[in-house]
């Protein structure tokens, strides 16, 4: 943990990372880089945190997460089956993820197949299939100790004559609803949680506000603001964790 840097170091840090140090300002600052698995894919996160007194028993936390590692891995994480019921099978391919202000634009395509259910409630005779280009807009909000993404809007562009037929029979709307519903369920089930050093998890931080932020140009990040418990009992637990790491020694 290091004291807050001077203006020269602050400017250099901003130029090197593209992240404004004001987003994680505090009396003390920490930087943590850690890999977190999402869908069994290791994703690197870097978290910059600023700490200062909020009350006699709580610390104010300002944190900024560099999510450009997640942004790079997102096509691999998000591409795959979105729905596999006996009536419809929808496969999503994500090609690109870009941050724009406090939103995230996801570009790709959705391939849908509509089938009749057989007696075993499995996909049977296919009666229609279509591929549509898709652009979704997502945002994140603080829920508990994590950021949960949600889909704000989806714009579908059906391809060619099959796309025209899809529009004619209202199948494009059904694809749109599936992307909103099933995509939203996936994002809600896979929140992004700022990683903490294991010995500091006992602080049990509470995040009160935050969301996605663009790291120019187009890079994905997220800012959160909250507080953490620093009561005497908690400090003793933290010291115990540090002792286990061999960082501190206690007199017997």
Image (spheres, helix red, strand yellow):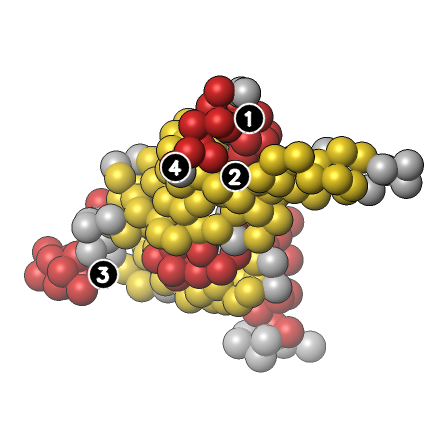
**Residue under the point 31% across and 47% down:** 98
N-terminal label among 2 and 4: 2
N-terminal label among 3 and 1: 3
How far apart, in angstroms, are the residues tagged by discs 2 and 4?
Answer: 10 Å
Quadrant containing the C terminus in the rendered view: bottom right
Tell me if I can see residue 221 in this picture. Answer: no
Q: Position of residue 96 (x, y in %)?
A: 35, 52
Q: Is mark 3 on a helix, strand or loop?
A: helix
Q: Name the residue under label 3.
A: 17
Checking the image for residue 160, the label placed there is 4
Tell me if I can see residue 93 in this picture. Answer: yes
- Nearest the camera: 156 or 137? 156
50 sits left or right of 150 in the view = left
Q: Is mark 1 in CB contact (under 8 Å) with mark 2?
A: yes
Q: Is mark 4 on a helix, strand or loop?
A: helix
Q: Is mark 3 in CB contact (under 8 Å) with mark 1?
A: no
How far apart, in angstroms, are the residues tagged by discs 3 and 1?
Answer: 45 Å
Q: Mark 2 points at which residue?
A: 130
Q: Vertical placement of 192 versus 181: above or below?
A: below
Q: Position of residue 166 (x, y in %)?
A: 50, 28
**Of the residues tagged 2 and 4, which is closer to the observer?**
4
N-terminal label among 1 and 2: 2
Q: Is mark 1 on a helix, strand or loop?
A: helix
How far apart, in angstroms, are the residues tagged by discs 3 and 4?
Answer: 43 Å
How packed is label 3: few (under 14 Cα within 10 Å), some, or many (20 or more)?
few
Checking the image for residue 171, the label placed there is 1
Which of the 4 image quarters holds residue 16?
bottom left
**Of the residues tagged 3 and 2, which is closer to the observer?**
2
How far apart, in angstroms, are the residues tagged by discs 3 and 2?
Answer: 42 Å
Quadrant containing the N terminus in the rendered view: bottom left
How packed is label 2: few (under 14 Cα within 10 Å), some, or many (20 or more)?
many
Q: Is mark 2 in CB contact (under 8 Å) with mark 4?
A: no
């Amino acid at each position: 943990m290091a004291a807050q840097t001077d203006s020269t170091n602050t400017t250099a840090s901003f130029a090197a990372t593209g992240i404004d140090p004001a987003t994680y300002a505090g009396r003390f600052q920490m930087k943590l880089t850690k890999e977190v698995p999402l869908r069994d894919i290791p994703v690197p996160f870097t978290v910059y945190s600023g700490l200062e007194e909020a009350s006699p028993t709580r610390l104010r936390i300002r944190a900024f997460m560099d999510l450009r590692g997640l942004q790079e891995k997102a096509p691999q994480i998000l591409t795959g089956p979105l729905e596999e019921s006996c009536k419809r099978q929808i496969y999503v391919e994500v090609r690109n993820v870009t941050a724009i202000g406090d939103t995230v634009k996801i570009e790709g395509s959705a391939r849908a197949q509509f089938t009749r259910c057989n007696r075993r409630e499995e996909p049977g005779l296919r009666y229609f299939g279509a591929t549509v280009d898709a652009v979704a807009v997502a945002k994140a909000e603080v829920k508990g100790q994590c950021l949960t993404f949600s889909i704000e809007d989806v714009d579908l562009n059906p391809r060619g004559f099959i796309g025209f037929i899809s529009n004619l029979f209202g199948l494009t709307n059904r694809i749109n609803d599936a992307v909103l519903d099933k995509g939203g369920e996936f994002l809600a089930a896979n929140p992004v949680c700022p990683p903490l050093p294991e010995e500091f998890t006992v602080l049990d931080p509470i995040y009160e506000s935050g969301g996605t932020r663009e790291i120019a140009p187009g890079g994905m990040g997220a800012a959160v603001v909250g507080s953490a418990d620093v009561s005497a009992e908690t400090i003793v637990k933290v010291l115990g964790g540090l002792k286990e790491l061999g960082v501190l020694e206690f007199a017997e």
